[in-house]
Amino acid sequence: MADLLIGQVLSFAADPFIEGPDAAQIWARGGVLVEAGRISTVGDAATLAAANPAATRHDYGTALISAGFIDAHMHYPQTAIIASWGKRLIDWLNTYTFPEEARFADPAYAAEIAGRALDTALAHGTTSLCSFATIHPASVDAFFTAAEARQMRVLAGKTCMDRNAPDTLRDTAQSAYDDSRALLQRWHGQGRAAYVITPRFAPTSTPEQLAALGALWAEHPDCLMQTHLSEQPDEIAWVKALFPQSRDYLDVYESHGLLGPNALYGHAIHLTGRERGRLREVGAAVAHCPTSNTFIGSGLFDLSGLTTAGLRVGLATDTGGGSSFSMLRTMAAAYEVAQLRHATLHPAQLIWLATAGSARALGLADQIGTLAPGMEADLVVLDLASTPAIAQRSARADDLWQALFPTIMMGDDRAIRATWVNGRLAHSQRES
Ligand code: GUN
Ligand code: ZN
């Protein structure tokens, strides 16, 4: 059975950071034909409807149909502590994050929060996420099991820590290797799941643990490796004290086998020139987490500098360091942070970052992130007039970008008319 989604359709044939807004493909009255979990055609709605009379039609009127949002870096176990007040990175971790993550020793709690995190993501139009779990292997099983039930393409890994964390949240170099390996073998490539080797960050791993995870990655180089890099000045100073031999923060990872083209570093704000050059040379990716970077007071990510240098950058909520589950709100924060750095992001660049850009950073650009024949059918349908304030502004728009920008800046889950995952309706706005 085929489904034909009709509305304004937006996708990208190229990178708008290189080509500008012309990289976008827009069908004012377009259609996306979905069959067996994949997109079979994208084009003019009337033509598609005539050619596919048996397809079930879903006419979304003037709503915007885009590839679903992809959150390139988040912590699903921090769902329940999002928006915790008043701390910076290290004391935020100690005060809020570690006590909450300790609760994931209970698999039932992990299952409850995994389901909640994924349902919240779907309600915000997010169809794929790359998540940290906790040190507990069952927290990884809970996440992948919940994602499997929702048919979502997700990536995740056991967060490894063998020092500078509470006793209840510490593994060892050997157990981190063994547990990660067992989870990787259980989940990597299982349906839509991908395992990600996940040392939390340099301060919470001994050199032995970093090296053990580097060795595991060398055995499974097709896996992603995710961690944190250069988020706050105190953290960078701490890394320098813990690893005096290393040239800089990135060098800590590199010297333990944790740098490569399949590496994805969260934050990457306070990079040295050498680190930027090395990331680029190797072809590693970074995740821009703008609501987190302002909320925890980390700093202003240099998006223009890094994209101009050719780095792959994904967009991410960093839940619960980030202050919103919404990739719309995250795009707005990216826009504001760029403004503070005297750079202006076009709406095409913002929505590209949240879809194709994140897909590329996760090495999944040939599967998700754009609407094109053969791609997996993960889509979001955006109401561009979801509140009176947004509606009155978008009514003045002369083109799609002007119509979309108020939703990027002021929109939230009320703008998510529907979310489709793997060719099925996964979330739909309640009619009031
Ligand atoms: N650095 C190490 N762990 C974390 C985390 O959980 N959140 C953020 N934002 N930064 C981190
Ligand atoms: Zn993070």
Image (cartoon, rainbow, N blue to C red):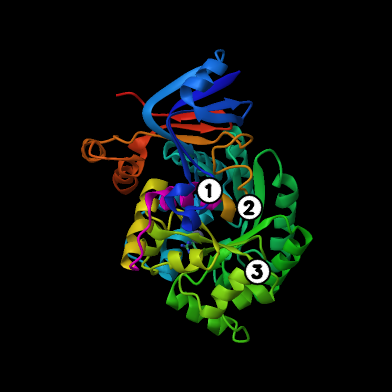
As helix, strand or loop, the secondary structure at mark 3 comes to helix
Distance from label 3 to label 1 (Cα)? 21 Å
As helix, strand or loop, the secondary structure at mark 1 comes to helix
Q: Is residue 150 left or right of residue 94?
A: right
Instruction: Give amino acid for label 2.
Output: Gly
Instruction: Give amino acid for label 3.
Output: Val
Prevalent SS, magenta region:
helix
Disc 3: which residue: 282
Give me the residue at 38% from left, 68% from top.
Answer: 300
Distance from label 3 to label 2 (Cα)? 14 Å
Disc 1: which residue: 356
Which quarter shows the C terminus? top left
Q: Position of residue 191 (x, y in %)?
A: 68, 38
* Residue 176 in the image: above or below residue 250: above
Determine if residue 158 is in view.
yes
Determine if residue 249 is in view.
no
Q: Is residue 133 left or right of residue 23?
A: right
Distance from label 2 to label 1 (Cα)? 10 Å
- Give the residue furthest to the bottom: 245
Give me the residue at 40% from left, 25% from top.
Answer: 60
Give me the residue at 61% from left, 51% from top.
Answer: 156
Which residues fall within the magenta stretch? 341-358
Identify the mark nearer the N-term, 3 or 1.
Answer: 3
Q: Is residue 34 left or right of residue 188?
A: left
Give me the disc on residue 363.
Answer: 2
Give me the residue at 32% from left, 59% from top.
Answer: 336
Identify the mark nearer the N-term, 2 or 1.
Answer: 1
Q: Residues within 10 Å of mark 3 (few under 14, many from 20)?
A: some
